[in-house]
Image: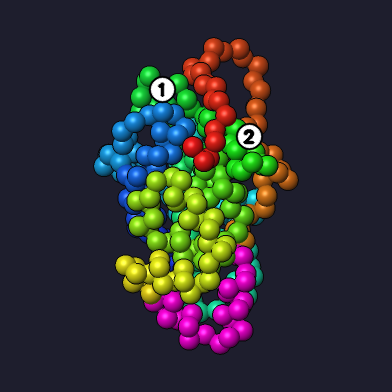
Amino acid sequence: MYSAKGHLLLRDFTKNDGNIIYEKFLPSNLLKDIIRYLYKIEGNIFGLESVIKTFENNTYYFPIKNFKLSAYTDKSNFKIFIDYKMKEELETRNIDKKIKKFIKKAIMTVNIEHEFGHSHGAFLFFYDSKNDVHDSPKAKIILNENEEVTTNEGGYLFEYILYGRKIEGLNLKEAIYINNHDNFSKNLKQFRDDFINLDNEPLNAVFEREGKNNSEIQEIHKIFKNLPKEKQTYLESKRFKLGKINKNSFIEFENYIFYQNAIRKPHDKHKKYSRKKLKD
């Protein structure tokens, strides 16, 4: 037997691992592009050291046993809870532990970005009294000529903006790309286009390019090359699912209205947003 503290400390990732993602993503060119795209805000609010610390100090990394969720943001209290769980298929396979951890790391990064999509509006609301956006902006996003989505579900909004789709699973090429934090230096269009174009590249080419200045990716590549062919084929072809069910099959608490008897005046307004084109 061991304590709850021991259980948390024995996990693959801790708060320090999550803080690294904040420290790379929040001051990045990529995020500045997204904030400009959504709000027309110039500057680098989220790159301030005090702001990065605010997110780090209010984010908690716990195993979330609710099968419907792999992360959660309490906007009113500005508390963010992150897990990196995934479906059982990788756990039940005899795959090298470092490769498993590498894929989970990419999932944790996506979960942090997803929850930032929920929390950033609340932060802007409390940070700047002139900003009247508390909830996620409602945006119509044109993915391509034949597909568009309208959403104010902040987590999925960020996934569409960053990756061109909802991230319900990742393959190894995508995990490699996400785990190379140098990609945060790209502008939004380049980041998204390069992610989407991974479909047209062989896995070894992705390993070579993304691992040039990344010792972790180089190590994973070396392990991969020494695996039996059947395991290589499995890792090349498999998309590993995040450990939650699709939100469409249960109450969307992000948008659900809980009624009360008292009548009160609103404390914030909600901006209307025009159609957003990802190619802009």
Locate residue 57, reporting x and y percent. 35, 45
Q: Check residue 158 in the rendering and tell me which mark sits there, or answer none.
A: none
Classed neighbour count for the residue bearing mark 1: other residues with Cα under 10 Å, few (<14), some (14–19), many (≥20): some
Q: What residue occupies the far left of the structure in this picture?
A: 49
Question: From where the camera sits, is residue 82 visible?
Answer: no
Q: What residue occupies the far right of the structure in this picture?
A: 249
Which residue is label 1 attached to?
131
Q: Is residue 255 above or below residue 238?
A: above
Report the Cα–Cα distance between label 1 and label 2.
22 Å
Residue 138 position by quadrant: top right
Magenta span has 229? yes
Q: Residue at x 60, y 79 (%)?
A: 233
Magenta span has 253? no
Residue interval drawn in magenta: 219-240
Q: Is residue 246 above or below residue 51?
A: below
User: Element type at marker 1?
Assistant: loop
Q: Residue at x 40, y 39 (%)?
A: 33
Q: Nearer the viewer, mark 1 or mark 2?
A: 2
Frontmost residue, 275 versus 73: 275
Which residue is label 2 attached to?
150
Magenta region's main secondary structure?
helix
User: Element type at marker 2?
Assistant: strand
